[in-house]
Amino acid sequence: MKITNLGTRSYASFYVACEIYKTILHCPTCKLGLATGGTMVDIYKFLVDLLKRNQLDVSQLETFNLDEYVGLDGTHEASYRYYMNDILFKQYDGFTESLLHIPNGVAPDLEQEAHRYEQLINEKGPVDVQILGIGENGHIGFNEPGTDMHSVTHIVDLTESTIEANSRFFETRDDVPKQAISMGLSSILKAKRIILVAFGEKKQKAIEALIKGDVTKDVPATILHAHPNVEVYVDDGAMPDKEK
């Protein structure tokens, strides 16, 4: 696992956007695992700019999002389907709708939907590059502390800290969904390459726990030590003090 401090959020976001762009450039049929949340906003904005400047063909690109809230359909402004459309997919012409995969948070049978999504990853994958953020409690995707290290796509009960962290995207804290469908930890590890990004002092403790190297259910992100090709990019705020 390699950790690199790129100084500022802007520099780090642009660097990761370039890595995604190069992946598409060299393999137009590549599979990308995508994340959402505040950390990813600038990354996707830079990526859209690169795509527009170079008019890159993305029609054969296939994407798999990490997760989706239970109870929100794709028209809800706080859903991750809406987020992806608003920030990336609708910002550049050429994406093929049938190749943009996100779990269905309003499926009639959520367990069946989780199984369907895991099968889709297995049939279409492996993912070439998986982009990850990290929660303040060390979660990746919505795999909260205590998640089985062998977990596949599943229904997750969100912790109070995650609900609190995500409440800024909703009118009130009570509006934040209490569950999500998320790729499991073993689902994430199937990717050929993993890039994890973290910004700000609130993520510093999670990054410190990650780079210590002790694999523990208490910090789900530490499962990444079991993967041979992981890169971590942070800004000054997220870099543990002793590593600066």
Image (cartoon, rainbow, N blue to C red):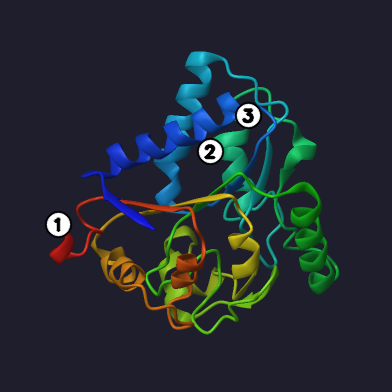
Q: Nearer the viewer, residue 238 or 216?
A: 216
Specify the amino acid type for callout 2: Ile
Specify the amino acid type for callout 1: Lys
Rendered image quadrant of residue 107: bottom right
Q: Is 98 positioned to the left or the right of 237 in the image?
A: right
Q: Which is nearer the N-term, disc 3 or disc 1?
A: 3
Judged by depth in the image, the label closer to the viewer, 1 or 2, is: 1
Q: For the residues marked 2 and 3, what is the alpha-carbon distance in whole angstroms?
A: 22 Å
Q: Which is nearer the N-term, disc 2 or disc 3?
A: 3
In the rendered structure, are the residues bearing label 3 and label 1 in contact, judged by CB atoms less than 8 Å apart? Answer: no
Q: Secondary structure at mark 3?
A: loop
Residue occupied by mark 2: 87
Residue 113 visible in the displayed image: yes
Q: Is 56 positioned to the left or the right of 216 in the image?
A: right
Position of residue 220 measured from the top left corner of the image (x, y, whole percent): 48, 74
Residue occupied by mark 3: 27
For the point 14% across and 66% down, the residue is 242
Specify the amino acid type for callout 3: Cys
Judged by depth in the image, the label closer to the viewer, 2 or 3, is: 3
Rendered image quadrant of residue 158: bottom right
Q: Nearer the viewer, residue 46 or 12?
A: 12
Position of residue 213 measured from the top left corner of the image (x, y, whole percent): 36, 73
Position of residue 112 measured from the top left corner of the image (x, y, whole percent): 84, 69
Residue occupied by mark 1: 244
